[in-house]
Amino acid sequence: MRSKRITLAIMVILVIAAANLIGCSSSSSPTEPSPLDVSTTTNSSALSATTAAALNSAIDDEYKARAFYDAVIDKFGPVRPFLPIRDAETSHIEALVRLFDAYSLSAPSDPHAGQFEAPDTVQEACQIAVQAEIDNAALYDEILEGVTEEDVIMVFGRLQAASLDKHLPAFKRCS
């Protein structure tokens, strides 16, 4: 009997963990997991200067990607894979903003909105996006060095995985 209760408790924990990993947020695209909820983190005194700089670099790069994808959509309409990936970039930004909020920091505003011009063709835009996603993954490798806060490490890892496992292959297919 006790063994059955333990098994049931483990199953409940696994179901809850899986739901959190899969994401139940309506703001996420169906092809990407919901960004990690970081609401349990409490204050900026626990945040290192290295991590604060890493957060700023990460959100700036996500803003940049979204602004470029917006320019492509503005020029060519709601073309795939730009539309769903632009929505994913917005989810990435929201995840990073939650980290800023969790550590009582102000997230910087988007300096890149409206600052990009789309290239002449969607194929050319895809080629640019391939390099941007490669650069984004490399950025996360770089900024993860020295970050010790577990919630930040987990969010950065998920955002990097989205770039490598979802965005990059989609842009390679259209380039």
Image: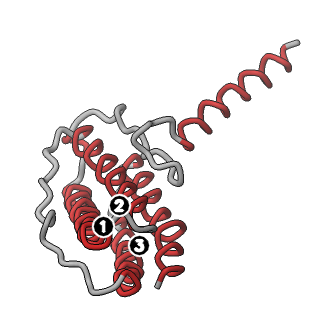
Q: How many marks?
A: 3
Q: Secondary structure at mark 3?
A: helix
Q: Position of residue 120 (x, y in %)?
A: 28, 87
Q: Secondary structure at mark 1?
A: helix
**Tags 2 and 1 in contact by the CB under 8 Å rule?**
yes
In this orientation, does residue 109 appear?
yes
Q: Is residue 65 left or right of residue 35?
A: left
Q: Position of residue 60 (x, y in %)?
A: 21, 64
Crowd band around label 2 with a 10 angstrom C-alpha radius: few (<14), some (14–19), many (20+): many
Q: Is residue 57 left or right of residue 173?
A: left
Cα distance between the residues tagged 1 and 3: 23 Å
Report the residue marked by disc 3: 137
Q: Amino acid at mark 3?
A: Ala
Q: Amino acid at mark 1?
A: Ile
What residue lies at 13% left-to-right and 66% top-to-bottom?
114
Report the residue marked by disc 1: 73
Q: Earlier in the sequence, mark 3 or mark 2?
A: 2
